[in-house]
Image: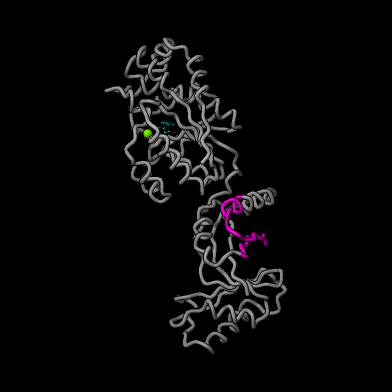
């Protein structure tokens, strides 16, 4: 008898001809999540099994698996040869000491000599010989699950833990997230990664107006997201000189709008370098002055890559609930200056006209400023 962890995949089975590709990618992601823990990962039909791990690492493995997208559910199980005696022995380890229970069999091996009903009855009866329990097939306090596999083994377990769902990261290409130190953009990363997109990070700072603490905070956010996204690199670019130029030459109510356009231009260049196929932001419609359809239109106008805004229809409190769930909230609320707040105007334009924006922007050497910003590109591995 051997302890294993059974991992069932989520939507992968929907993918028809691509199934093999999805399964392999999922396996790669599981391996990455389990890095540093001794284990073997086996693929059986419709499942992955983690075996050969140190007992004391089981909780840690659960935690890590719970953050891998594509996992539908997982269970700690006993793997035994599929003869009745071995199954009963393991079933007794899973069955409760008191109360009500039932046995529920799933046969992947349809040639197994006993039907599911026969196995339920037989194993149930053997458990009843040893324990003072009651069978309740409708609402048992505990279920003993038997999964008869095709390779002469059976898996016996007592619970299904819910997985993170979604698609394996990497199955939907790559995108570049504009990550601030705020609450929203990390949540956007999580949502997009859940749909299978591999997320790269880009952060803009205004050193020396913003300090190392602000940068460290963003690294911390990325580190917290890493178990979900798999990414361990953050790129940063300084926009200080751009903000100073805008401040000096342009209408103050357009500060945020103009800076946003520079951010998008720079992000697009970084994205092309990374073979990322889209930009991702944490914008949500109407949340702040720049997050109007006019504001979004003005930023979209300077790039050709699509811009994904997964939070566009969310209220702040919905976003906060998610941020707390994924563990980024407490970091996001730490009080460090974000570059946007440094030159914040008293009255930002809520519905800036594109013609006015372009007029004001014409006072700047856009290409030179963008190039200069690209020179400050840094990679932080964490
Ligand atoms: P967040 O909570 O993500 O900071 P926010 O509600 O504060 O968002 P804004 O400051 O308007 O909203 O930023 C909107 C989006 O623009 C952010 O979600 C992020 O994608 C991007 N962004 C803003 N500031 C930066 C920055 N310093 N570096 C990278 N991206 C940024
Ligand atoms: Mg912000």
Does the segment drawn in magenta span residue 19?
A: no
Residue 110 at x, y = what percent? 70, 71
Q: Which of 337 and 135 is in front in this view?
A: 337
The chosen color scheme is: one colour
Q: Residue furthest left?
A: 346
Name the quarter where the N terminus is drawn: bottom right
**Where does ligand 2 appear, by image quarter?**
top left
Quarter occupied by residue 155: bottom right
Residue 327 position in % (x across, y down): 41, 49
Question: Image check: 122 left or right of 253?
Answer: right
* 111 up-or-down from 320: above or below: below
Camera-side residue: 232 or 79? 232
Residue 260 lies, in percent from the top left, at 42, 25
Q: Which residue is drawn at 50% across and 59% down?
A: 60
* Residue, far bottom: 129
User: Looking at the image, how many numbered discs can be counted on the residues?
Assistant: 0
Magenta span contains residue 50: yes
Q: In this view, does 138 lie above or below 134?
A: above
**Residue positioned 44% across, 83% down in the render:** 98
Q: Is residue 8 above or below residue 106?
A: above
Residue at horizontal 59%, vertical 53%? Answer: 30
- The residue lying toward the viewer, choosing from 41 and 101, is 41
- Residue 18: % across, % down: 68, 48
Q: Relative to 339, does residue 72 appear above or below in the rendering?
A: below
Q: Which residue is drawn at 49% across and 83% down?
A: 135
Q: Give the residues in magenta.
A: 29-52
């Amino acid at each position: 008898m051997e302890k294993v962890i059974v991992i069932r995949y989520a939507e992968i089975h929907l993918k028809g001809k691509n199934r093999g590709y999805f399964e392999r990618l999922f396996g790669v992601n599981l391996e990455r999540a389990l890095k540093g823990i001794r284990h073997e990962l086996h693929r059986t039909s419709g499942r992955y099994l983690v075996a050969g791990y140190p007992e004391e690492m089981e909780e840690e493995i659960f935690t890590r698996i719970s953050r891998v997208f594509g996992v539908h559910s997982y269970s700690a199980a006993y793997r035994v040869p599929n003869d009745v005696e071995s199954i009963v022995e393991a079933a007794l380890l899973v069955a409760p000491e008191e109360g009500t229970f039932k046995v529920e069999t799933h046969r992947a091996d349809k040639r197994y000599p006993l039907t599911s009903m026969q196995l339920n009855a037989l194993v149930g009866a053997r458990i009843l010989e040893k324990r003072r329990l009651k069978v309740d097939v409708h609402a048992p306090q505990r279920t003993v699950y038997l999964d008869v596999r095709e390779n002469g083994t059976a898996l016996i377990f007592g619970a299904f833990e819910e997985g993170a769902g979604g698609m394996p990261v990497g199955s939907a290409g790559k995108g570049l997230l504009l990550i601030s130190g705020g609450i929203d953009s990390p949540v956007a990363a999580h949502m997009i990664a859940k749909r299978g997109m591999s997320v790269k990070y880009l952060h803009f700072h205004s050193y020396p107006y913003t300090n190392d603490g602000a940068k460290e905070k963003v690294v911390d956010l990325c580190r917290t997201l890493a178990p979900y996204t798999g990414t361990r690199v953050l790129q940063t670019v300084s926009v200080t000189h751009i903000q100073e130029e805008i401040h000096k030459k342009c209408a103050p109510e357009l500060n945020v709008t103009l800076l946003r356009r520079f951010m998008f231009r720079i992000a697009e260049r970084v994205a092309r370098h990374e073979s990322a196929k889209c930009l991702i932001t944490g914008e949500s419609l109407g949340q702040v002055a720049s997050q109007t359809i006019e504001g979004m239109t003005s930023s979209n106008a300077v790039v050709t890559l699509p811009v994904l805004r997964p939070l566009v229809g969310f209220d702040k409190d919905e976003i906060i609930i998610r941020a707390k769930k994924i563990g980024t909230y407490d970091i996001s609320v730490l009080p460090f200056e974000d570059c946007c707040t440094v030159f914040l105007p008293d009255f930002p334009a809520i519905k800036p006209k594109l013609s006015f924006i372009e007029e004001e922007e014409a006072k700047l050497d856009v290409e030179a400023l963008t190039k200069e910003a690209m020179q400050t590109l840094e990679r932080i591995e964490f």
